[in-house]
Amino acid sequence: MLRRTRNTLAVLATSAAALTAAGGASAQEQVTIEYWQYFFEARVDAMEQLIENFEAANPNINVEMTHFPYADYRTRTAVAVPSGEGPDVVQLFYGWLNDYIDAGLIQPLPTDPFSPEMVEAEFFPMVQAMERDGQYYALPTAVRSLALFYNERLLEEAGVEVPTTLDELVAAAEATTERDGAGNITQVGFTSGMTAQDHHWFREVLVRQFGGEPYTDGYRNVNYDTEAGRAALDFYLGLEEQGVTQSGFMDEPQAAFRSGRAAFHIDGSFRIGALEGERGLRWGVTELPANNDGERSNYSSYWVNAITSSAEGPEYEASVAFMEYITSPEAMEIWLETVGELPARSAVGMTEENANDPVFGPFIRGLEYAHTTIFADESAQRQVLVDMVERVQLQDMDPGESLTMAAEAEQALLDDFHGE
């Protein structure tokens, strides 16, 4: 649990002095750098601790953190960096990397200390997507996968076990769904929503579990307009048709689960910190359900930090030192305990203790069979699947026709990005 080794953080923090701005800003020169991230309470708490540790070890460097609501974050960054009034170090979703490079918002990390050889030897392989032309542009502190959260109380009341397969999930969700006298759902067995994590679950998990491969040629070609893709879509749409879920229930899937009004919810390891703070909510987490043949899949992702193109001179050197610290093993341990996201360095994350942890374990085991979508435009590609489902649910379009439209629309996005 997040609380299991909280007392070790003070010990970890004492080693921060090992990381100084060697080769960077001199001890006589005071430097201030800006760090930006979107607001997520546990992430802000973790970064505040990392900044405190870094500043203690580097008294000549001051790090000022600014955070914005997620909805405003990309726009603010895109406007501020070119003007020279934005951050020196910025956090971004891995799927946005191409946009940030094309817009000239970030610069390559120096090969000393961020050599490709070091990154490829010490970080999980998924991080290699951050490399362009022999240089890395960004690196994560943590990585994450998906898992199935469940409400222990609701399962006990319904007398059902934690599901291990998709069929068991549907049956358990049916047993835990409740309606009022008019037939309206008041408690969902399973949360749903393509705007949350379901678009990842569809692409990288369901399509594969129904025998397909969502993309080919290094994610350049869409490959889910197939029998497997149709079967995956039918399964997903069938959850609502069978009455075990309702799109838009309580607006956000995570809100329904946090309020105790949902029995099952698929989400990332980043949700752990928020759930720990919910009074009265007894919850557990397990690996994503396998198909009936026992085949599993998962989706892995991460947020990264990068040095912006506006960082120069002493600010650039201080930014390099800060990047080195926030991607260190120490920072990753602190992030794991505070946020719940998994260390990006495999040796730090894949410990026996972590793998067997009742909360972290399902996510860490999920990394072993996870796939990381290489997006051209994550937001636009997500919207393609949002539209795919809405055409069926709101316009009564044939699912096969909507699937074909989605595949064609996403292929057009990929072709445009790759210049084909």
Image (tube, rainbow, N blue to C red):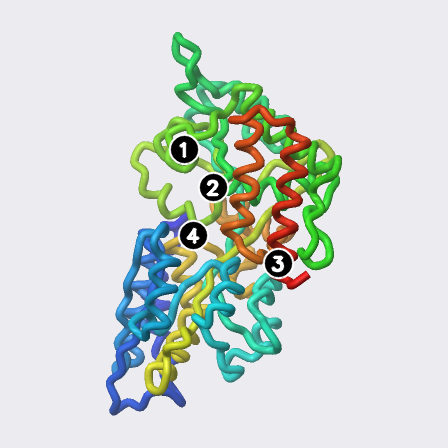
**Marks 4 and 3, how far apart at CA:** 37 Å
The alpha-carbon separation of the residues under discs 1 and 2 comes to 13 Å
Mark found first going from the N terminus, 4 or 3: 4
Distance from the alpha carbon under mark 3 to that under mark 2: 25 Å
Instruction: Name which residue type carries label 1.
Output: Phe
- Label located before the other in sequence (1 or 2): 2
Name the element at disc 1: helix
Question: Residue 51: where, in percent of width, then height?
Answer: 31, 69
Q: Is residue 79 above or below residue 209?
A: below
Q: Classify residue 226 as left or right of residue 380.
A: right
Q: Position of residue 131 (x, y in %)?
A: 58, 71
Q: Amino acid at mark 3?
A: Asp
Local packing at callout 4 (Cα closer than 10 Å; few below 14, some 14-19, many 20+) is many
Q: Which residue in the structure is indicated by mark 2?
A: 196
| Nearest the eye: 66 or 209 | 66
Given contact means CB atoms under 8 Å apart, are the residues at marks 3 and 1 in contact? Answer: no
Q: Secondary structure at mark 4?
A: loop
Which label was assigned to residue 416? Answer: 3
Task: Answer with mark 1 or mark 4, whichever residue precedes in sequence.
Answer: 1
Task: Pick whichever of labels 3 and 1 is earlier in the sequence.
Answer: 1
Q: Residue at x 49, y 44 (%)?
A: 358
